[in-house]
Structure formats: C-alpha cells, structure tokens
Image: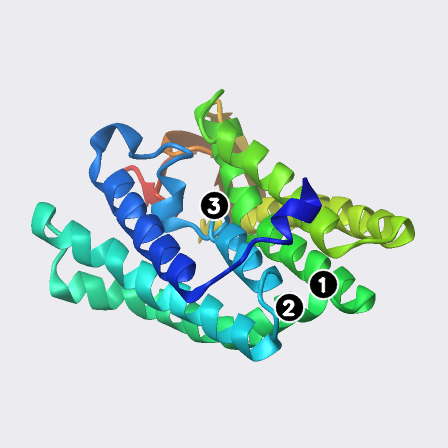
Amino acid sequence: MLEKIKNIKMTWLKVIIMALAFGAGTAAIALIPIFKGTSIYNIAVCFEFWFIPAVLIGINCKKPLEAALKVFVFFLISQPLVYLIQMPFSTLSAGDFLNYYKYWLVWTFLMLPGGVMVWLGTKKSWIGLLDAVVASAFLFFIEFPNHFSTLLKDGFPNQLLACIFILVEVVFIILIFAKEAKLRVIAFICAVLLCFGGLYVNKAHTLKTHTSSCNIGEGEYTVSYCDDGAEATVEGGKLTIFAKDDGNYSVKIKNTNGEELSFNYILKNDVVEIIEDE
C-alpha cells in the first residue's frame, strides 16, 4: 500500500483539483454548526490534517523544485479559499480574513523549502529520518497535547478522533520516510519521547498559566478553606492559588489571631483573577 501511495502521478491538474477540493471542503466543515468544537472541525483551525496533502504531493514529484512549487501552490490556493468561501455565509469580515490568513501565509511560503525536504526525505535515508522526527515534534508539541488536554478536561469522547488521527498520522509519516528497520525504530523511539515531552511541557505551561498570587501583608497565615478543584498555599506573605478548570473558587486564609480573609479565584479562558472579599 505504501508503494502505491508513493507512485501517484502528481500532475499540476491533480494538485489544483486537490487544492480546490480541500479548500472548499474545509470551508463547508467550518460553516456547518454541528462540527463546531469537534475533531472534524480541527481541519479549519489546526494544522495536523494538512501534513497529509503536503507529504502526498511532495513524495510523488520527480524533482525537488517541482515538489517545492506544487506543495506551495496547493497551499496558496487552498488556504485563502477556506476563508473566501466562508465570508458570504458567516460573520467573517475582510479584516478577519487578513488576520487569520497572515498566519497561514507564513506557512505557505515555508512550504517551498518544506516541499524540497519532503522530496529529499524519500531519496536520502537520514533526511527521511529527520523529516519523520521533525513532523513528530510539530504534532506532539503543538497539536496533540492541546487535544489530549481537552479530552481529559471536557470528557470522553471530545477530541478523541483528533488524538487517534495524530497518532496514526505519525505512524504513517514514519513508515513513509524511514525505510530501513533500524531507522524506523529510532523514529518511533523519538516519537514516543516527543509525545511524552509535549504532554509534560503542556502540563507545565498550564500550571504556570493558571497559577496566580497576591500579597496578603504581614502575619502568619494558613489556608483554612479551599473549594474543590483548586489548590492554595501561603508563603512569604503571598497567597498562591491554582485551578485546572474554568470556574469561580473560594479560598479562605486565617492568621494566628483567628482573623480570616476570603478570596475569589476566577479562571476563565486561561485568564486568572483573584479578588479579595470585602
């Protein structure tokens, strides 16, 4: 099957048809309300899915320049089409289009060297291994941790398909670019390490983002009450509170004289606020 995938006659007509189909299909998904917030909707806002056409086009070109240009043109057509089709049917304005597309435009131009690297990955084993590891790093450090966190936070099966898709995608990319058994073993070991590394970094970032402190003045205080779902500590004249999930949490601290102070820790969309009750 892998050999058939590597022997597709990738003409300019096929590239353009693919670009139009992917762009229009993505726009349709973005416009259908039932897909909002699902794994399928990710194609419109995340980039894990877009590795597939880039790889398929790049590995089926005969020359590196051809690979660079065809991958570049695919994204040059498909990405703006996603937004242009949405504009007449949604609240998406021209300003929104420019704001969103400038992000994808950077990636589009990066497809010029990217297409060359994809093509070289099928010719030189060490570049193929590099391609597989770099792709795994992108997927496991940027997309997978966020989807996995959503799965744990919002509950099964939210983003389950996205997580499975990325895992299968990494296996597919490794099998495509790492031809020799020893290179595949190395690539899979790197992928596993990158997966756990991405989850660890994401967790550390979440802890840092959702942790906030406020000064409480002099005196020795201890935490006398903390709502479930939050954690609070007092040290060095500071009250530090952390919570993983959005919500409004009540925290109380008491000093050696029995005086009590009450605080509300508010977490919403990664924005934290601590308010002392009067």
Q: Is residue 173 above or below residue 251?
A: below
Residue 14 in view of the camera: yes
Q: Position of residue 87 (x, y in %)?
A: 13, 54
Residue lying at 61% horizontally and 43% vertically, measured from the top left: 169
- Amino acid type of disc 1? Thr
Q: Earlier in the sequence, mark 2 or mark 3?
A: 2
Q: Which residue is mark 2?
A: 119
Q: Amino acid at mark 3?
A: His
Q: Which mark is residue 122?
A: 1
Question: Which residue is found at the position 70% from the left and 51% from the top?
Answer: 176
Q: In front here: 97 or 173?
A: 173
Task: Give the residue type that dot 2 points to.
Answer: Trp
* Residue designated by label 3: 210
Q: Nearer the viewer, residue 145 or 208?
A: 145
Residue 156 or residue 89, whichever sits in front: 89
The N terminus lies in which quarter of the figure?
A: top right
User: Residue 14: where, in percent of width, then height?
Assistant: 41, 57
Residue 72: x %, y % from top left: 44, 71
